[in-house]
């Protein structure tokens, strides 16, 4: 392909986003667009178009598969666009960002040859079945110097099997977007088993010292009640960002929260859901919040749900017990935390983090929190909290001011 004369029509092309429509003109364009200067490639293909492109590219002799003469008639997922993009992609030596569907084992082998690659997004959701539905006996060298690795998944088995096939993954960022394809895949029992297995494999395969950012988000629609589900993340002591969000109620006590964050002293951003079913989910209290600030001294942004009504052992006017907190926390989101006294909440927050000017309420403008029936009453409470915090800030800045 790269030696094709038509490639010279785009000699300096650096970025291509391609949504295949199954027409010959689209394929011809793709053929011309794969040039050595390409740095960013985003491919999306509709399943009905794959067989067409498969035959077209095989006819260009871009790859051969003599042992499988009936490839054009195989299931869409089994070949996963592999025959018509992988070999050309492997020749794009300046490619830095690659966003592609499931490319199977051979595809991964070719992608690992891209030494300039910095960001890789693999969408493992569409293929049915997929190479990664079962654990592979093969071991590939892995990725040695990625900045970001993103996986789109419909079950936790696929990312687990994918990671198991690699000897090492050296990446600064790792993100998993979950969109379950079946009720079985998203059942609490299934996820409670598969999620810890996935995180354990992540710990084994990822360079524990290199990983700095970990994200897992999606629409799980369940309550995770097993203690220690996220314990494997403690191995990544250099994490600066930990983001666990969207549609998953995580039961976590003060002790469990502190156990997790105690091994992550470099955290700057921590987000553990902003909306939970508080009636059925165990959530931390101010003790857990104070614990995080002690354990993560450089934390600047924090989002989680707590129960602000449980104040046993908390001195409202001196929540640190005389301790002078050195905290950089300036962005706090407490989601649909339980609240009954805005004044008490404001006093405690002011004592914990004098830098904090207000509680971030932006989460109430987006789903699912903007759909909660208690939104209006809750917002009134949190607006009062911010009003008190603002007043306390004025007093600190003007110590001689007398407030009546």
Image: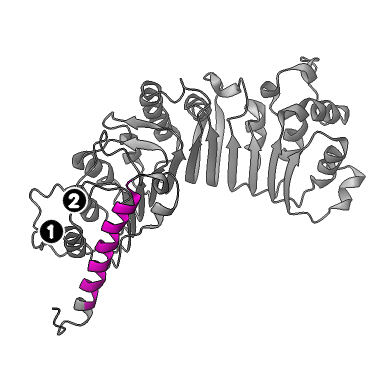
Residue found 32% across the figure and 56% down from its top:
379
Q: Position of residue 274 (x, y in %)?
A: 35, 47
Label of residue 319 in the image? 1
Q: Main secondary structure of the magenta part?
A: helix
Count the numbered circles shown. Answer: 2
Residue found 35% across the figure and 59% down from its top:
360
Residue 25 falls inside the magenta stretch:
no
Q: Position of residue 135 (x, y in %)?
A: 52, 20
Marks 2 and 1, the one that precedes in the sequence: 2
Q: Is residue 48 visible?
A: yes
State which region is magenta: 374-394
> Circle 2 is placed at which residue position?
286
Above or below: residue 221 compared with residue 368: above
Query: Badge 2, how many Cα within 10 Å: few under 14, some, many 20+?
Result: many
Snapshot quadrant of residue 2? top right
Q: Position of residue 107 (x, y in %)?
A: 66, 31
Of the pair 124 and 392, the residue shown nearer to us: 392
Residue 264 falls left or right of residue 133: left
């Amino acid at each position: 392909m790269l030696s094709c004369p038509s490639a010279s029509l785009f000699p300096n092309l650096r970025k291509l986003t391609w949504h295949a429509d199954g027409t010959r003109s689209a394929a011809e364009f793709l053929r011309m667009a794969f040039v050595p200067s390409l740095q960013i490639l985003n491919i999306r293909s509709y399943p009905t178009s794959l067989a067409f492109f498969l035959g077209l590219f095989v006819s260009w002799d871009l790859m051969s598969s003599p042992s499988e003469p009936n490839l054009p008639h195989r299931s869409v997922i089994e070949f996963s666009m592999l025959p018509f993009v992988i070999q050309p992609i492997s020749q794009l030596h300046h490619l830095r960002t690659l966003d592609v569907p499931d490319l199977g084992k051979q595809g991964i082998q070719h992608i690992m040859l891209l030494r300039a690659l910095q960001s890789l997004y693999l969408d493992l959701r569409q293929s049915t079945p997929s190479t990664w539905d079962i654990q592979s006996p093969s071991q590939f060298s892995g990725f040695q110097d990625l900045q970001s690795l993103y996986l789109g998944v419909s079950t936790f088995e696929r990312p687990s099997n994918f990671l198991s096939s690699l000897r090492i993954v050296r990446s600064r960022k790792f993100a998993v977007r979950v969109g379950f394809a079946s009720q079985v895949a998203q059942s609490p029992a299934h996820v409670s088993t598969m999620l810890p297995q996935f995180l354990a494999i992540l710990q084994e395969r990822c360079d524990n010292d290199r990983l700095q950012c970990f994200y897992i988000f999606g629409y799980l629609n369940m309550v995770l009640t097993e203690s220690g589900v996220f314990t494997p993340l403690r191995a990544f002591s250099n994490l600066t960002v930990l983001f666990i969000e969207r549609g998953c109620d995580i039961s976590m006590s003060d002790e469990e929260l502190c156990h997790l964050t105690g091994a992550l002293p470099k955290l700057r951003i921590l987000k553990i859901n902003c909306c939970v079913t508080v009636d059925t989910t165990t959530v931390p209290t101010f003790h857990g919040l104070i614990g995080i600030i002690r354990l993560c001294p450089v934390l600047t942004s924090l989002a989680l749900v707590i129960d602000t009504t449980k104040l046993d052992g908390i001195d409202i006017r001196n929540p640190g017990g005389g301790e002078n907190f050195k905290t950089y926390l300036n962005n706090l989101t407490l989601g649909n935390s339980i609240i009954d006294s805005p004044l008490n909440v404001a006093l405690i927050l002011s004592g914990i983090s004098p830098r904090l000017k207000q509680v971030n309420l932006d989460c109430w403008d987006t789903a699912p929190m903007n759909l909660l029936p208690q939104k209006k009453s809750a917002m009134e409470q949190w607006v009062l909290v911010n009003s008190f915090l603002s007043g306390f800030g004025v007093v600190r800045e003007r110590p001689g001011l007398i407030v009546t």
